[in-house]
Amino acid sequence: MSFPATTHETHLAPGGIPGLGHALRMRRDPLALFESLRPYGDVVRIKLGPQQVYVVTSTAVSTELFVSKYRSFDKGVAVEHFRSVSMMLTARDESSGASMADDRIHDQVMTILLAGSETAATALSWIFLLLDGHPEVATRLLAELHEVLGERPVRAADLPRLTYTTQVVDESLRHSPPIWLITRRATEDVSLGGYLVPRGASVMLSPYLTGHDPTLIEDPDTFDPDRWAADRVTQPLRLAALPFGAGPRKCIGDSFAVVEAIVAIATILPRWRVRRQPGNTITKTAGLTYFPAGLRLTVEARDREPATPNSGSVG
């Protein structure tokens, strides 16, 4: 990926209302607003009331911010060096040598647990909805669970063998990422993708936008777990799928959320059929998370017969 050699001003997105800017569009359908910004540049300004916000529409520029320019932006939470509990417990202040205070360790651990749990719960809603609409995927998934687990509960040692289950989770997180919005604040004047972002400016990035980048992902609106198969997965796909961000300030609950989703699927689906209620209408909603509002599922105990290629699906 390459970026412009010169720094230039960003374009202000059209369609703003005097006094409100793009606030109404942001409230009504933020993902549609973000999608509409692609033609106006890799970094586009919108106005939310009096505040100007810089929206990154390009996967390349999103990666630049996350990986090479992250020091020029503040996440607002001191998580950069605290990627695991062990690192928190052994961390020392560079100047004083003091260890991390217990209350700060507690806060970070709670961030991991709560963020991971909320993300996993929303991810499971999308997974069950997507499986309901793709019975062939559900059949393959159930067959793998029976082959690897048999009748016993899932164990940590099973995770590397649950390859298709992992692909389903990865594809769901790309297709319908619960964390649809990531924010940053510039701590200095910075060139981002060749665009000038002034100190103090708010920046928004969307894992939904990057995960549906048609220049990097073939048929991005299609749910296809096989795109994550070892012989098919591509570097552009890995770059575009950023459900938890990337780089040193990547969400600290990422691994926990993925493992939690895999374990939940492996625990629930061999024992229960999860179906969407007939006539159920959902609204794809981008609020604090991106979730299928109004989703109603029914759960029915299944027989313990092993799955076959023609057996029933989760849906």
Image: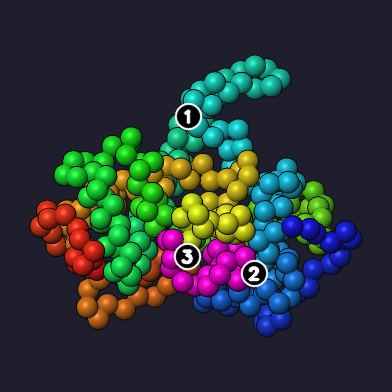
Q: What is the CA distance from the residue labelled 3 to the residue labelled 1?
A: 30 Å
- Answer with the quarter of the image where residue 2 lies: bottom right
Under circle 3, the secondary element is helix
Q: Is residue 50 left or right of residue 216?
A: right
**Above-or-below relation of 161 to 105:** below
Q: Which residue is mark 1?
A: 85
Amino acid type of the residue tagged 1 in the rendering: Val
CB atoms of marks 2 and 1 within 8 Å: no
Q: Which residue, given by chain and number where applicable, does mark 3 sit on?
A: 175
- The C terminus appears in which quarter of the rendering? bottom left
Measured in 3D between alpha carbons, the distance from the residue under mark 2 to the one under mark 1, in whole angstroms, is 38 Å
Quadrant of the rendered structure where residue 280 is?
A: bottom left
In the figure, is residue 257 to the left or right of 82?
Answer: left
The magenta stretch is 208-226
Does 103 sit above or below residue 173? above
Q: Which residue is mark 2?
A: 215
187 horizontally vs 142: left or right:
right
